[in-house]
Image (cartoon, rainbow, N blue to C red):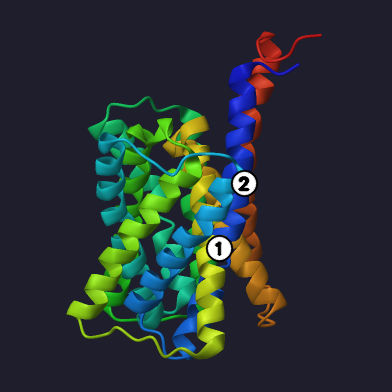
Amino acid sequence: MLSNCLRRELAGAGCALASAVLFGTMPLMAKTAFLHGGSPASVASARFLLGGLFCLPLLQASHASWKLTRRQLGHALLLSLLLSSTLLLLFSAYGSIGTGLATALHFTYPVAVLVLACLVFRGPLSLLDALCVALTAGGVALLASPSGSGGDAAGIAMAAGSGLTYALYIVLLARSDLRRAPVFAATLWLSLFASLETGAFAIASGTLTLDMGWEGWGAAGGLGLFSTALAIALFQKSVFLCGGLKTSLYSTAEPLTGVAIGLAVFREPMTPAIGAGMACIVGAVATSALVPVLAAGRKGKGWRP
């Protein structure tokens, strides 16, 4: 039988991988909303608002309370600022340098999580963690290289900046009081705060638009349900189960979903660089997930006859 520690690790890995698949559909749905008249800030606000509303029936089904303590609300407000900043930067980068390169630059965040955890919060660093981060960085670079997407410096800076703000979100989330709240309640408040923040930005910048047609709003609804209510909840659960660095490594399966959508929906070619990049990412995720289990088994700590 598995020890409680390994059960938490495997459950966290499962949550992270499931959230990665759901997050991986975000570029497709976001671009659909953009093509039908939505601005980055408007789509971001709609995504968070609809995601928060989708949390209500999920809370009811799980018989959990939507209420948070004053301290938890404060943490949710702080984290929502990072979450909304991440999405605004990433959605804006989609229009400047394309979704492929923007997503690849965003996925430098595991390296940033590692640096923050080690240098700022004095977290432990193993050789295995460093190896997995290196594999991840190499895989992301290979996935970005065949796209041929050029772009201005501002677009590249926004995409890379979204990775930095998301890394800070992950590290602070792991240390927040939201770990004691029902996961859909935390997602509800994070989403509602982020919707207000991105909506205020849309109004202030003069980019608020509600005329997206049924296709645009359908895409926003998909963003709300799949890449907000479900994906954020699963991501939070993973962070609380196995830590921010492990979750960020498992979540690098997200670009693989984007590549798969490109191959299946847009008939994009499979190049050697894409294949090598996917192999690096799969290797990093598999190593991060399986080596602790095997090591515990050899020591006789993770398995019992």
Q: Secondary structure at mark 2?
A: helix
Q: Nearer the viewer, residue 220 or 86?
A: 220
Question: Toward which corner of the image does residue 231 lie, by quadrant?
Answer: bottom right
Q: Nearer the viewer, residue 257 or 182?
A: 182
User: Which residue is tagged 1?
Assistant: 225
**Of marks 1 and 2, which one's residue comes earlier in the chain?**
2
Residue at 41% of width from left, 70% of height from top?
A: 102
Q: Quadrant of the N terminus?
A: top right
- In this picture, is 68 found above or below 169? above
Can you name the residue that lies furthest to the left here?
204
**What secondary structure is found at the residue carrying circle 1?**
helix
Quadrant holding the C terminus? top right
Numbered badge on residue 61: 2
Q: Quadrant of residue 153?
A: bottom left
Residue 164 point in image, percent of width and height: 30, 54
- Say which amino acid is labelled 1: Leu
Q: Which dot, 1 or 2, sits closer to the camera?
A: 2
